[in-house]
Amino acid sequence: GNLAVLAAISQHQAHLPENFVINLLTVRHLLAPTYTRLAIENDPQRIRNFLEDRDHILDIPLEYAITDWTLHHTLTIASGNPVFTLILNGFHTLYIEMGKQYFSLQEARVHSRTFYEKLYQYAVNDDPSAAEKLSEEVMQKSLDFWQMVEQRV
C-alpha cells in the first residue's frame, strides 16, 4: 500500500484496524516536533497570527478538534515541506472525528490550550528549539490521553 491506501482506510472509521489511531498518533508524535521546529524557523509570523485568537476557542470538543487540525495544518505549511501537509491532509476527516472524542476529555482541552499558549510564546520569541521540545512533549501526552479515551469506550 501507500499513503492513498492509508487515507482511504481513514475515511471509514467504523472499520479501522485495531490500534490504527494509536499508530497514526505515533507517526504524528514523530513528525510534529520536526514540522513545528521548521515552522517557527521559517514562518513564525504565520504561527503567531494563527494563535493570536486562541483565547476565543469555545470550550467544546468539535471546536478544539477543528482548531487543533488547523494549527497542525498551518504548522506543516509553514514548515516549508509540502510532504508534511500531504501526509496530514490524508487524515483530515478522521482527525476531526477522532478529535471530537479526544477533546471530550476536559484534561485534553486544558492541555491543548496550554500548548497553544506556549507555542505562541515560542513563535513570538523565535525559539524553534523550544517549540520542537514542546511539541514532542505534547504529542506524547496526546498518546496518553487517547489511551484514556479508548478505555472509556
Image (cartoon, rainbow, N blue to C red):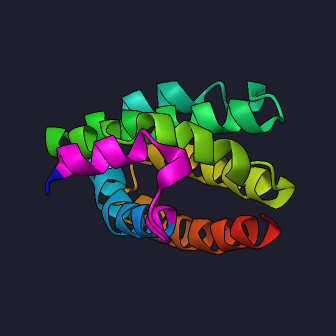
x, y percent for residue 3: 19, 49
Q: Is residue 19 magenta?
A: yes
Q: For the stretch drawn in magenta, what is the main secondary structure?
A: helix
- For the residue pair 136 and 146, the one nearer the viewer reads as 146
Q: Residue furthest front?
A: 15
- Residue drawn at x 26%, y 46% as measured from the top left: 87
User: Is residue 44 shown to the viewer in this render?
Assistant: no
The answer to whether residue 37 is above or below residue 29 is above
- Residue drawn at x 40%, y 56% as measured from the top left: 127
The answer to whether residue 135 is above or below residue 35 is below
The answer to whether residue 141 is above or below residue 24 is below
Residue 142: name its quadrant.
bottom right
Quadrant of the image for the C terminus? bottom right
The answer to whether residue 147 is above or below residue 109 is below
x, y percent for residue 37: 32, 56
- For the residue pair 84 and 50, the one nearer the viewer reads as 84
- For the residue pair 114 and 28, the one nearer the viewer reads as 28
Quadrant of the image for the N terminus? bottom left
Asked if residue 134 lies left or right of residue 24, the reply is right
Q: Is residue 25 magenta?
A: no
- Residue drawn at x 76%, y 50% as measured from the top left: 109
x, y percent for residue 70: 49, 31
- Residue drawn at x 39%, y 36% as measured from the top left: 73
Asked if residue 83 lies left or right of residue 94, the reply is left
User: Is residue 102 shown to the viewer in this render?
Assistant: yes
Residue 46: name its quadrant.
top left
Q: Which residues are magenta?
A: 3-21
Residue 115: name its quadrant.
bottom right
